[in-house]
Image (tube, rainbow, N blue to C red):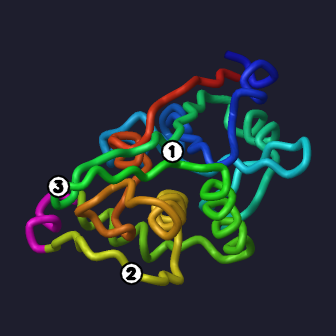
């Protein structure tokens, strides 16, 4: 689907997963290394009639950029995922956790509050070590999430924003180790459409 057709179908708080580009781009290496078709992730955010992508971009840092500019820059495919309403039984009681518009704005407003922060290269180094042959045998991924992290990359921003105001998209893995592919595999979101350049 082309962007002009897709734009009106995208909601605030939707997750934008960018497909990796061709070799030898940075995105290709990220996707290959994390065994995923995705190399980058951001959040859809509506302001008036403009659709933005809130993201952490390597060599740039955090920004809130019109999504139409991302289409021009990436020249690749983007998959849009949406959070689903969740029901579960806890101690014999049926619990519902709906994903409301208010929650979606809290999520994107938190992500927007990080605009201007530098890219967290140290986090990339930790993720690299957790996938690296031999190193990963001596390096254990954390499972506890930090309450308030100060170092972010694209994927850690998305999961931290969601966990803070809704649910943990990737349970049993610390936000600091989550890759775009891990987000795509979350059972709490569903792919709703693909945008082609």
Q: Residue at x 60, y 61 (%)?
A: 58
Compare marks 2 and 1 and give the one earlier in the sequence.
1
Q: Residue at x 57, y 24 (%)?
A: 193
Q: Residues within 10 Å of mark 3 (few under 14, many from 20)?
A: few
* The magenta segment: 132-138
Q: Which residue is mark 1?
A: 27
Residue 13 horizontal/vertical position (percent): 63, 49
Q: In front: mark 2 or mark 1? A: 2
161 vs 32, left or right, is right
Residue nearest the observer in this picture, 22 or 94: 94
Residue 109 horizontal/vertical position (percent): 70, 65
Q: Is residue 94 magenta?
A: no
Q: Which mark is residue 146?
A: 2
Quadrant where the image shows the C terminus:
top right
SS at mark 2 in the image: loop
Q: Which residue is mark 3?
A: 92
């Amino acid at each position: 689907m082309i962007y002009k057709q897709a734009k009106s179908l995208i909601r605030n708080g939707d997750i934008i997963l960018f497909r990796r580009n061709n070799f030898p781009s940075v995105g290709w290496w990220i996707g290959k290394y994390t065994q995923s078709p995705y190399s980058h992730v951001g959040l859809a955010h509506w302001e008036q009639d403009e659709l933005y992508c809130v993201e952490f971009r390597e060599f740039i840092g955090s920004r809130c950029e019109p999504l139409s500019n991302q289409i021009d820059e990436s020249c690749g495919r983007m998959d849009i995922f949406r959070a689903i309403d969740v029901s579960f039984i806890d101690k014999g009681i049926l619990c519902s956790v709906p994903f409301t518009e208010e929650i979606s704005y809290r999520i994107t407003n938190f992500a927007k509050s990080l605009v201007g922060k530098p890219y967290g290269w140290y986090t990339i180094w930790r993720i690299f070590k957790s996938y690296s042959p031999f190193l990963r045998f001596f390096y254990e991924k954390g499972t506890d999430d930090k309450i308030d992290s100060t170092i972010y990359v694209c994927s850690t921003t998305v999961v931290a924003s969601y966990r803070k105001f809704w649910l943990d998209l990737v349970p049993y893995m610390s936000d600091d180790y989550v890759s775009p592919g891990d987000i795509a595999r979350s059972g709490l979101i569903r792919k709703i459409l693909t945008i082609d350049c």
